[in-house]
Image: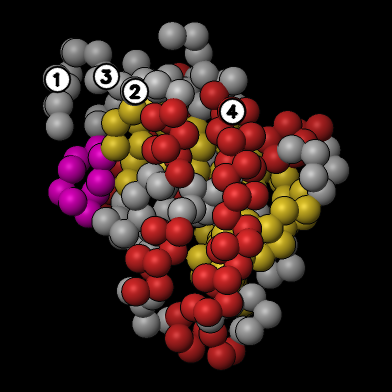
Amino acid sequence: MTQEGPHSPPPAEVLVLQHTLEDPPGYLGRWLDARGIPWQVRCAEAGEAYPASVRGYRALAVLGGEWSANDDRPSLRQAESLIREADALGVPVIGHCLGGQLMARAWGGRVARLPQPEVGWLPMRRRDSAMARHWLGEDAQATVYQWHYDSFVTLPPGAQLLASSAACAHQAFAIGPHLAMQFHIEITPDKINEWLAHPGAVYPDAVGRYPDSVQDPARMRAATRHHQAGSEALADHIYQAWRERWAPA
């Protein structure tokens, strides 16, 4: 991987911050590649340091991961610093799950454990606002992929709530040119299979305790076959809305 010096231009138009090995860019990478957009990913768990600055990039994407946004990890605090810098520079940020939570924290919101987790393909209702339609399209409801126990329970000052679900009041918010999502719009079947192979210690108990919001592997795989195409169509819309806010090349 090319390493840029302190005064050299970034090697790509889009910087992607990956926290953990098991949560790669997925459909986001496919979307960028299909449009010939050069992008660079840095993975903290792989030992790749995040850049010191986002200056020169046209956009910043922050991925998810099994860590809590409140964990005491230097890479998480560095991600928040880059998010704040991106806002100051007018670089549009898009956050997926943990990435959205870090955006909330970076701008004064609060992340905490939810009373009920969400794992699997679950319905989400869009708010009736022009901003929500801009980011999430015209459909009032969509089925999206979730895997989270925490969420941004308090939005940052000035944020606009875009969507909610039965177990999670804050599914997405917009602030300035930025979008934070609690759901995984970058999801692919390969990612789901990897997560189900290593689901962590909390998931097995959650399946039994919260059957209305936590799907077992069989239900999840069946739902993936039914909902993956719709998720990718929604991702196309979301990522295009994000791209429209990038500064000219």
Q: In this view, does 201 lie above or below 223?
A: below
Amino acid type of the residue that numbered disc 2 sits on in the rendered structure? Pro
Q: How far apart are marks 2 and 3 (CA)?
A: 10 Å
Q: How far apart are marks 4 and 1 (CA)?
A: 31 Å
Q: Residue 5, labelled with which disc?
A: 1
Q: What element carries label 3?
A: loop
Q: What element carries label 1?
A: loop
Q: In which quarter of the image is residue 69?
A: bottom left
Q: Position of residue 146 (x, y in %)?
A: 56, 62
Which of pointers 4 and 1 indicates the residue nearer the eye?
4
Q: Is residue 118 above or below residue 90?
A: below
Q: Quadrant of residue 189?
A: bottom left
> Which residue matches tag 4?
240
Q: Which colour scheme is used?
A: secondary structure
> Which residue matches tag 3?
10
Q: Distance between the residues labelled 2 and 1?
A: 18 Å
Q: Position of residue 21 (x, y in %)?
A: 27, 56
Ranked by sequence position, the earlier of labels 3 and 4 is 3
Which of pointers 2 and 3 indicates the residue nearer the eye?
2
Amino acid type of the residue that numbered disc 3 sits on in the rendered structure? Pro
Q: Position of residue 111 (x, y in %)?
A: 53, 59
